[in-house]
Image: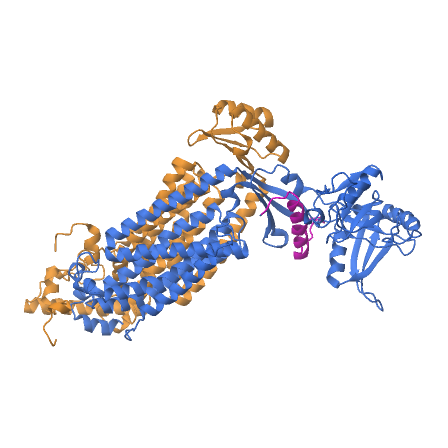
Amino acid sequence: MSKMGSIGQRLYRGDISYNFIARKKFWYALSAILLLISIGGLLFRGLNFGIEFTGGADYSIPNATCSVEQARSTSESLTGAQTIVTETGAGTIRVQTETLTPDQSEELAAVLSNSCGTSADQIKFQVVGPTWGAEISRKALQGLGVFLILVTLFMTIYFEWRMAVAAMVALAHDMIITVGIYSLTGLEVTPATVIGFLTILGYSLYDTVVVFDKVKENTRGITGQSILTYDEAANLAVNQTVVRSINTSIVALLPIVAIIIVGAYVLGAGTLLDLAVALGIGMVVGTYSSIFLATPVLAQLKSATPEMKSLATRVNARRSQVVKKAAESGVLNVEGLGLDAPSLDSKDVLMVSETAVIERNQPRRQPRSKRKKGS
Amino acid sequence: MATPVKSKPWRLLSALLVVVVGFSVWALFPGTDSSVRLGLDLQGGTQVILIPSPVVEGAVITDEQLAQTVEILRARVDSLGVVESEVTTAGSGNDAAIVVSVPGESQERLVDLVQQTALLNFRPVWNLFPPNPEATREDSPSSTPTQTGLVQADSNTAEFETDVAALNCLDPANYSGGTPDNPELWLGTCDQTGTVKYSLQPAFIQGTNVTNASAELPQGGVGWVVNLEFNSEGGTALANASSQLSVLPECGTGQSPCNAFAIVLDGVVVSAPRFNEAILGGQASIEGNFTAQEARDLANVLKYGALPVTLEPVDITSISPTVGRDQLEAGLFAGGIGLILVTLYLLFYYRVLGVVAALSLLVAGSMTYFVFVVLSKTVGLTLSLAGVAGAIIAIGITADSFIVYFERIRDEIRDGKSLRQACDSGWIRARRTLLAADFISLLIAVVLYLLSVGSVRGFAFVLGLTTLMDIMIAFWFTHPVVVLLGRTKFMQRGSRWTGLDPERLGGISVADAMAGQSRRKRREVLT
């Protein structure tokens, strides 16, 4: 059985299991640091908004024969406005200025095409008035508000309010960190980025719902037994879905990485690249939070309820008994079961010993062909 | 849980087959256009986003005003003669935005064209004619040269008359309007339905002289009338014109000039009432066989000098067709690479199940394509770059449904269930998760679609569509195929290639081991 070395395989077989919930303080601290850095970045550096938000004109000139300097002087002499000229991708020059009147913008396109040896209809340009960005942002915020209310309602009805709260905490975490990364790296925020942010909302929640659904399944009727505490059942759910979480993230990230690579090397700046970068960052953060943040927050909220507290007491009492019995009879390998410290904080309570498994003396499932006839 | 499931895979698969075949036939039916309509950013073109604001400050833009503005803009844009030009609105009231897009080569006139306020003026009618073009003299009887657009001249010259005669009012390009006329000149034009051709004198009143207009059903009257009020300048002009015109012979009798005046909007006659008497008070009413709607429309045209709002262009984007095509190709290329990578990963990890997943993706992909073509045909849906991005991202989200399902099957096998049982009981659990998670995706798609502008909408639409496809494929394809596979000898033998080998999966769950109780007992307690 030990021939499988990869962590993924062992996780999925249940050979190893990680107690995400008991180590929550570490993950909370990590998230808190990331959040602080992000908020700090937002406060001190702000975001680098694209022209759609600030207003301005943006020209992209493919196969340009002119130099960056030439393009700058051409544009500045015509418009009298300060111009930023950059080279994006192979031979494509990007010219950004303050917002222009429709007449000026046509003229600049003509002049640039002349001096850069590109025909006028090859040039892609965009001129945006400063009010438009405010409009887009307002619409996006409005959409965000409506969406959050609906999702909270849905989760409260489908799950319960504590799960809705935990999901919202994870969501806020994902958004702040993603926006924070944008602020710290100075990546440009365009309407496509905003689409990306909004999709992250959906993705982050999607991920959380999958994990919570397993938690819900594992904890149905949990107060009717005294084997597992809520924390443990929730942690089991995270462990059971962790393979899925990783696989899903890899599968979702693969196409996004493809876009980023194609975008960066073939297309240059544009909708596709902006969107993919935002999503890539958001998905990584979203996967992290669904595993390390959402469920621990949920477990903490839930364990504070009287029912779960009394459950935890019962579980502990029962465990001490089992340990005592086992020690008396000497049948069970107590150490291997990790039940020597029967408290709620036991970090290793989920570590499973194979000896214990074997001792259970259950018939192994056999393929039909190998079974004895009549059984 | 566990009321034993009796799934009927063949029935589900046939249902899917019917749907897929149905859509593919609809999409690819010969003789119709079976391509996806591309958005401006992919086929190149010019797009202007306009924000309307009310003429009177503080007022609220009504839906009616917005619809009227769009109507007028559409007429103007159509005058460029580019097929598939579009004028759409997003939002309503003072938050509305109007998006004008013209595909193809860069349209430099577009901004001027949409921004100008439409021109309304009142002209005395000189004469009216049937709409068809007359042959100009006898020079080339075989190919009648026809005049298009507006005919304008300084005075009623012979040349003007010939040009008017040659004007073809049966051609929609000539009666859809959109080209403002010069009020100082004579004008030959059509009415807005293309049934009458007019020869008109220079304008005697400009639209700006109209202070109010309303539709009314007068007491004791037989039909709707449109009441007009003019400012003092307009009132004087009207008094003079009506005194002169009302004594003239009726129009349509062949005599010219005649006693009607034409209300001309953006170069097209919207109404040509006849003067019954001299109108001296600066107030007039137009009678006719109006329906309530027609009367209201005419009143609106008169009242707002055509454009009921002022328009500010806030975003002008121009993309060359070559750049557009490059973007599309790069997008498809990225999508292709993404799909291959995902397929390879799924094959590597899930073996035979990976093949099912890859096939599911293929079916989902083709189904999405067919639905797109059908929607392009029926409701004019266009695919933008943001939509392409949405579709690429959907690959991952769709694949996730399979992963959730497969992982559930593995859980069930680890719990000691047989493969056949696991395929069904795993599905029952996975199904609930899928529906809950997809509901969230759908929710954000709908909210984004309803509350956004431009490219965000295209993205939201594709996201919503692919989420629905995801649900359909998971229910009607992936699950039945896995169930069928689970019945085969190959899968039941448990080879390492199945991806579901109980030997490799351990066959026993973590929880059981920890609890130290029999699996069955724990189940009774927990479920």
A282 or A180: nearer the viewer:
A282
Q: Residue furthest left?
A: A330
Residue B143: quadrant of the picture: top right
Q: Is residue B330 above or below residue A347?
A: above
Magenta span covers which residues? B54-83
Q: Residue at x 85, y 53 (%)?
A: B252
* x and y, in percent, of residue B277 in the image: 92, 55
A345 or A284: nearer the viewer:
A284
* x and y, in percent, of residue A176 in the image: 41, 47
* x and y, in percent, of residue A22 in the image: 25, 56
Q: Colour of chain A?
A: orange
Magenta includes B59?
yes
Residue B440 visible to an observer of this rendering: no
Is residue A217 shown left or right of residue A320? right
The scheme the figure's colours follow is by chain
Magenta includes B97?
no
Q: Colour of chain B?
A: blue
* x and y, in percent, of residue B103 in the image: 56, 43
Q: Residue at x 75, y 63 (%)?
A: B292
Is residue A130 shown left or right of residue B342? right
Image quadrant holding the C terminus of chain B, namely: bottom left
